[in-house]
Image: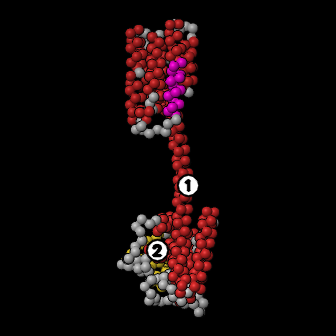
């Protein structure tokens, strides 16, 4: 647009045969310099994503000097010939181009100053010549400067807005990728951490049983091989995006693992909660909580007893896991398992809390759940079912001491 304005208005004046040759020659050279400088300055400006405090330092001085010098020449010769409508064209374009590099406040000051000063050159020449065109010579340049700045900065604003939107879309895409990586890392941490903890537990148990009970040690080694295969399968499933943790499976797995570790595990499951029509997403999140809580019991405590309570209360699925023996070996303060799960439950409209009271540690999760329809339990069923490991108390000081009853507990 700038090149077309210069070529149409100033170029026509340069090619006009009525204009003296002494004015046409320098004006033609200045026109070429002005076109080059305008294109260079505007092209560089369009490549920038504006930062208000940084743009002034990016103003290229070489192009600016060339544009100002050419603008002065293209203003001086028409003004000398009393062409009051042409002389402000080039200076107005220079002012608009420089304004594109300035932050909003300085930009407004530059344009306002140019509008105020624009009437002076033409007005003074008209007064000296006494041609009676003082009003036109003074007012037209001021209006032209304001109009040129508006038609130049308006498209620039639209350009910058489009650039910002494009940059926002790019950042949004990068953020989505990073969030997916964090989600994948959290899932992989949950799966590998849990499996490796159980494998380490059973390996230590098998090592102690090798001499006293080879048959039991062989059974534990077979279980370790199965766990390793499960870990590999689960890892592949996570990579493929297919694996969904089930609360029922995790509760059953916790029962076996805690019993094998010599921990007296009490499972209190509300039949209404077991039969509730929870969504797969709710069961998946509660399964993750159950798995993380079980891993923490094995890794960060010397628990002798653990309790799991799962029920529906006030339209929410509530899961609580508590254990003793947490005072001696507290969980690492910089752990991310529970914090990550708390964020995921919070995003789903639920909450995850944990607290330590003396040597007891408790994890409680709650998620919105549909109210189950009342069902008549079978006559033989109790209102609540409590599943306890078959070893209510263990005299051994180490939870991994070999005991023939462990096989039955598992």
Q: What predominant SS class does the magenta segment belong to?
A: helix
Judged from this view, the residue extending furthest toward the front is 211
Query: Pointer 1: residues within 10 angstroms few (<14), some, or many (20+)?
Result: few
Disc 2 target residue = 299
Disc 1 target residue = 177
Q: Is residue 115 left or right of residue 294?
A: left
Q: Is residue 249 magenta?
A: no
Q: Is residue 35 magenta?
A: yes
Disc assigned to residue 143: none
Q: Position of residue 328 (x, y in %)?
A: 38, 76
Say which quadrant the C terminus sits in. bottom right
Q: Which residues are magenta?
A: 32-46
Work out whether residue 31 can be spotted: yes
Q: Nearer the viewer, residue 109 or 402?
A: 402
Which residue corresponds to the image point at 38% horizontal and 31% vertical from the top-left? 109
290 to 28, vertically: above or below: below
Judged from this view, the residue extending furthest toward the left is 358
Q: Of tags 2 and 1, which is closer to the observer? A: 2
Considering the numbered disc 2 on the image, is that residue within a helix, a strand or a loop? helix
108 to 213, vertically: above or below: above
Q: Position of residue 48 (x, y in %)?
A: 49, 36
Going from the N terminus, do you reach mark 2 or mark 1 first?
1
Which residue corresponds to the image point at 59% horizontal and 79% vertical from the top-left? 221
Q: Is residue 172 left or right of residue 359?
A: right
Say which quadrant the N terminus sits in. top right
Q: Position of residue 302 (x, y in %)?
A: 43, 79
Q: Position of residue 185 (x, y in %)?
A: 53, 62
Which residue corresponds to the image point at 59% horizontal and 92% vertical from the top-left? 379
Considering the numbered disc 1 on the image, is that residue within a helix, a strand or a loop? helix
């Amino acid at each position: 647009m700038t090149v077309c304005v210069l070529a149409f208005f100033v170029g026509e004046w340069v090619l006009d045969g009525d204009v003296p040759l002494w004015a046409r020659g320098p004006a033609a050279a200045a026109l070429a310099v002005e076109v080059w400088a305008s294109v260079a300055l505007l092209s560089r400006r369009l490549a920038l994503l504006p930062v208000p405090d940084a743009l002034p330092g990016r103003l290229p001085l070489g192009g600016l000097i060339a544009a100002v010098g050419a603008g002065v020449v293209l203003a001086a010769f028409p003004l000398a010939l009393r062409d009051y409508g042409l002389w402000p064209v080039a200076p107005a374009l220079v002012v608009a181009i420089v304004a594109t590099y300035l932050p909003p406040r300085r930009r407004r000051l530059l344009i306002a100053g140019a509008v105020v000063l624009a009437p002076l050159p033409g007005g003074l020449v008209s007064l000296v010549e006494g041609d009676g065109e003082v009003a036109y010579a003074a007012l037209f340049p001021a209006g032209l400067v304001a109009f040129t700045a508006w038609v130049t900065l308006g498209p620039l604003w639209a350009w910058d807005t489009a650039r910002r939107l494009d940059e926002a879309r790019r950042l949004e895409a990068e953020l989505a990728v990073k969030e997916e990586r964090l989600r994948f890392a959290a899932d992989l941490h949950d799966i590998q951490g849990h499996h490796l903890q159980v494998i380490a537990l059973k390996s230590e148990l098998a090592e102690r049983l090798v001499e006293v009970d080879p048959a039991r040690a062989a059974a534990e080694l077979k279980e370790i091989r199965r766990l390793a295969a499960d870990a590999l399968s689960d890892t592949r499933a996570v990579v493929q995006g297919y694996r969904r943790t089930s609360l029922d499976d995790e509760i059953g797995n916790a029962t076996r693992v805690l019993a094998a570790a010599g921990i007296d595990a009490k499972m209190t499951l509300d039949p209404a909660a077991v039969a509730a029509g929870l969504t797969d997403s709710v069961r998946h999140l509660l399964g993750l909580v159950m798995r993380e809580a079980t891993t923490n019991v094995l890794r960060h405590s010397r628990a002798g007893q653990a309790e799991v309570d799962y029920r529906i209360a006030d339209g929410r699925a509530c899961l609580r896991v508590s254990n003793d023996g947490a005072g001696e070996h507290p969980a690492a303060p910089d752990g991310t398992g529970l914090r990550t799960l708390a964020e995921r439950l919070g995003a789903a409209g639920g909450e995850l809390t944990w607290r330590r009271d003396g040597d007891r540690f408790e994890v409680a999760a709650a998620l919105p759940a549909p109210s189950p329809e009342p069902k008549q339990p079978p006559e033989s069923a109790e209102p609540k079912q409590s599943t306890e490991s078959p070893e209510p108390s263990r005299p051994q000081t180490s939870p991994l001491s070999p005991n023939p009853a462990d096989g039955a507990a598992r």
